[in-house]
Image (spheres, rainbow, N blue to C red):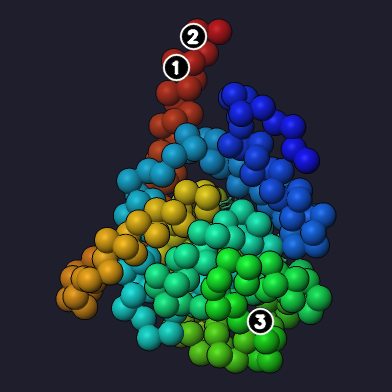
Amino acid sequence: PCMIPKDHPRYESLMMRERIVEGYKMGITVLQGLIAHGRGEMFDYVLGEKSHDFALKAEKVAVALMMLSKRPVISVNGNTAVLVPEEISELSKLLNAPLEVNVFHFSKERVDRIKKYLERFGAEVLANCDAELNGLSHGRRIVDRRGIYVADTVLVPLEDGDRCEILKKHGKKVIAIDLNPLSRTAMMADVTIVDNIVRAIPNMIKFAKKLRDASREELEEIVKNYDNRKTLRLALETIRDNLTKIAEEKLRDI
Ligand code: PTJ
């Protein structure tokens, strides 16, 4: 139903909006997800809408960490489900990490809708809602006994803040995908991928394929000495430098 011409200079970005809007009509994304997407768009814009070296590095470390983990799980919310359903299912299979539907705005009906939607792409999707994480009062406390509840590493795209802290308190390693390097989640995660999820997941698929036959030692070497604070600093410096460049160069030409 979307009438965006392919040659539109903002085609990719507008198509993402369409997906989120369609997701809302299907009862998968929530209205708040539209607002969250807008914030993400803004950070992507000032980052130059590309996967920078600091993001690629974090993506590689994230994949190695998932491969080293005993029970890795990929958490999926409404926005993630409509933006990258196929890709996240492929990554799930490559990493042997089940998907688990875990949403901030909880209803059992919505969780089941997201599960059904994702299952069309062939991954294992946990959504039993039969366990609770202590310390959280909102919907995200409700988890699956076989998934996040017992996971040692959780990949949490487009996170909302305090859950990261609780997951860490429960002794889990947290990998976040968040375009906002200033968010609480970004600051608190063990590995923060400051990249758009539509680029991050395909990049992670590539790394997962490359590292498929890597030894434990090789994987440990990738994870060792990773410094998340450095990633966040580079992301902020990249935004600063981009804005300086735009102020100096682009404005001269208009
Ligand atoms: O589906 P639910 O019920 O779990 O609700 C999902 C939302 C996204 C509404 C909920 O998790 C939420 O309120 O999130 P926040 O606090 O708005 O945080 C979302 C973060 O994701 C923000 O920091 C955005 O910058 C970032 N973000 C948005 N779109 C993208 C993104 N990061 C990467 N890629 C994106 N496409």
Which residue is at a point 41% across and 38% down the rendered structure image?
A: 238
- Which amino acid lies under the numbered mark 2 shown in the image of this protein? Arg
Q: Position of residue 220 (x, y in %)?
A: 23, 73
Does residue 48 sit above or below 109 in this rendering? Answer: above
From the image, tell me which residue sits under label 2. 252
Q: List x then y, in percent, for residue 173.
A: 43, 77
Q: Residues within 10 Å of mark 1 (few under 14, many from 20)?
A: few
Q: What residue is at 69 percent from the left and 48 percent from the top?
A: 19
For numbered disc 2, what is the local secondary structure? helix
Residue tagged 3: 127
- Decide: marks 3, 1 in contact (CB < 8 A)? no
Measured in 3D between alpha carbons, the distance from the residue under mark 2 to the one under mark 1, in whole angstroms, is 7 Å
Q: Quadrant of ligand 1?
A: bottom right
Secondary structure beneath disc 3? loop
Task: Looking at the picture, tell me which residue is in the foreground, 71 or 125.
Answer: 125
Are there few (<14), some (14-19), or many (20+) residues within 10 Å of tag 2?
Answer: few
Q: Amino acid at mark 3?
A: Ala
Q: Which residue is mark 1?
A: 248
Q: Quadrant of residue 57?
A: bottom left
Residue 190: name its quadrant.
bottom left
Position in image of residue 122 (x %, y %): 55, 71
Instruction: Find the distance from the CA under tag 3 to the CA under tag 1.
Output: 50 Å
The quadrant of the image that shows the C terminus is: top right
Sequence order check: which comes first, mark 3 or mark 2?
3
Left or right: 16 with respect to 229? right
Mark 1, secondary structure of its residue = helix
